Image: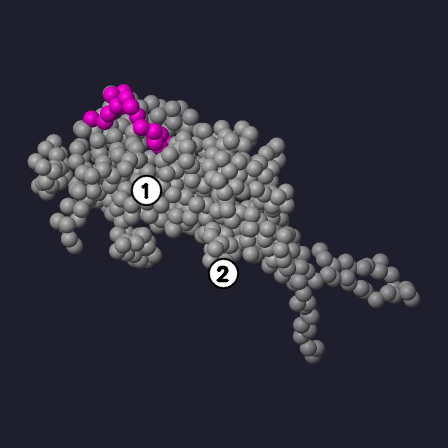
Amino acid sequence: MGRVKIAKKSTFIDMTAMSDVTVLLLTFFMLTSTFLAKEPATVVTPPSVSEQKVQETNYVQVLVNPEGKVWLTMNNDTASKWSNEKMRMALLDKVSEIYNENYTKKVNFTPQQKLAFSKLGSFGVPLSQMGEFLDLASEQEGTTKMDNWLMGKDENPNHTTGIPISWNSDENKPNEFQMWMKAIRQTENENLASAIKDGSGVAIKADGNTAFDVIHMVMDNLQTIHMNKFTLLTALKAGDE
Amino acid sequence: MAEIAQDNGGGKGKNHQKKMQIRVDFTPMVDMNMLLITFFMLCTTMIKSQTLNIALPSNEKVDNVENMSQASADDAVTIILDAKRKKGSFDVDSVNGKVQTEVYYYFGKPGGDEGMFGAGGSIISANNNLEKSEFLSNEGTSGAAMDGARGIRKIIQDRNMEVLKEIEKLKVQFREGKIDQAKYDELAKEVRRNENLKKPVIIIKSTPQASYGSLVEILDEMQINSIAKYQIDNMNRADSVMLIDYQNNHHE
């Protein structure tokens, strides 16, 4: 009587197919991904039934945190004549021009500082501190220091974050936030200027719990400089018709 | 697949080569891919933000008041947004980390036809026509969108019934495939602007402590209820007086 022979089976599992699938998935995610931009404040936008998607380029994002601090982010068409870098470069020139017209204390930026500014993501420090802020870029671990400054985690109490903003309805005496917005409109970027005119060029991003007072101030500031149309960034709300 | 079996051709010669299999183990490769996928999945935002367009009136003083379009008291609905927060601050008075929003409304003029103020600016509580409502979604999920509206939505809906009925007719046509999306949008726009239909003018006001989220919510209600005319305005004295008067008389 021979013993029942149990066929020796290999435990080797062929992973090739699995590998194929994962590579495909990986490719998909790599191509569709847009990285979350690092922002100075984390806000949860309120849900809305609006189905209009945010435009990809040609808008300025005004980020407002619940304490009423304001930061700007430029979103330009990187392929066009006005790339983000170029736009920011022109913007800094323009804003310092407007600033120097209004204040006796002048600001001037060196070419290195301008270059550093052109590489920023979100920005928003008082112009009087902008030079010092931009000098950090050439230091060791400069970007971390800049991020900390923007997020208000800087240990130096003189380093304030957020573009100075206040209630102001006098168009001829703009506050710094209004100066920035005016400067954006005055750069020769026609695409952005026309987007601002039809209301898609300025997007306000704020947390749902923010007090209306804070938002009202930002809106009022924009109204003063004749930017009466703008958009509010919201998240998708499901279920309601 | 990942193995190459070398066949020796079945010959039984001297040069009998050992049957060799070249197998590549793909397991580490899969492991690494999975890690990368996880990384990309966590770092991406698939859902893009939505936007809500708003247009505000210019801040400039208008000299010619007569030329401004005035809402008749019949059509006017004023909505006042408020929120409960920690006393004396704009901090969140936390119930699940959310601000408790409150919404009030009144029809026509503040204090009705007689007004809120008596002789010498005294406040007449009896004339307070402010009512409290809530943000509520529709009750139940079946049926037309108009059924089961509650809270502030119901109030707005009732005032805009004539327009909404016309829109509903269009929706039926659209669902039955008689008209396409573009045609529907065009007709709906016409209905919303139709001067012959009775429709409200809604004035949205917010107290300083009201939340931004509730503002977006009320703007949503405008969209849901196809309101053609609405505006965001500042609180005036009568509004504040009425709100405080209401809150004093309705303690919970």
The image shows residue A141, relative to residue B220, as above or below, that is below
The boundaries of the magenta stretch are: B52-72
State which mark lies toward you, 1 or 2: 2
Residue A144 in the image, given as x and y percentages of width and height: 57, 56
Residue B58 in the image, given as x and y percentages of width and height: 35, 30
Q: Which mark is residue B215?
A: 1
- Marks 1 and 2 sit apart, C-alpha to C-alpha, by 36 Å
| Residue occupying the point 49% across, 38% down | A99
The image shows residue A193, relative to residue B97, as above or below, that is above
The reply to whether residue B37 is visible in this rendering is: no
| Residue occupying the point 47% across, 52% down | A160
Residue B129 in the image, given as x and y percentages of width and height: 14, 39
Give whichever of A101, B154 is nearer the camera.
A101
To which quarter of the image does residue A87 belong? top right
Give whichever of A62, B61 is nearer the camera.
B61
Kindly identify which residue carries mark 2: A155
| Chain of the residue where label 2 is placed in the rendered structure | A
Q: Colour scheme of this structure image? A: one colour
| Residue occupying the point 39% across, 48% down | A68
Check the image and name the residue furthest to the front: A104
Image quadrant containing the C terminus of chain B: bottom left
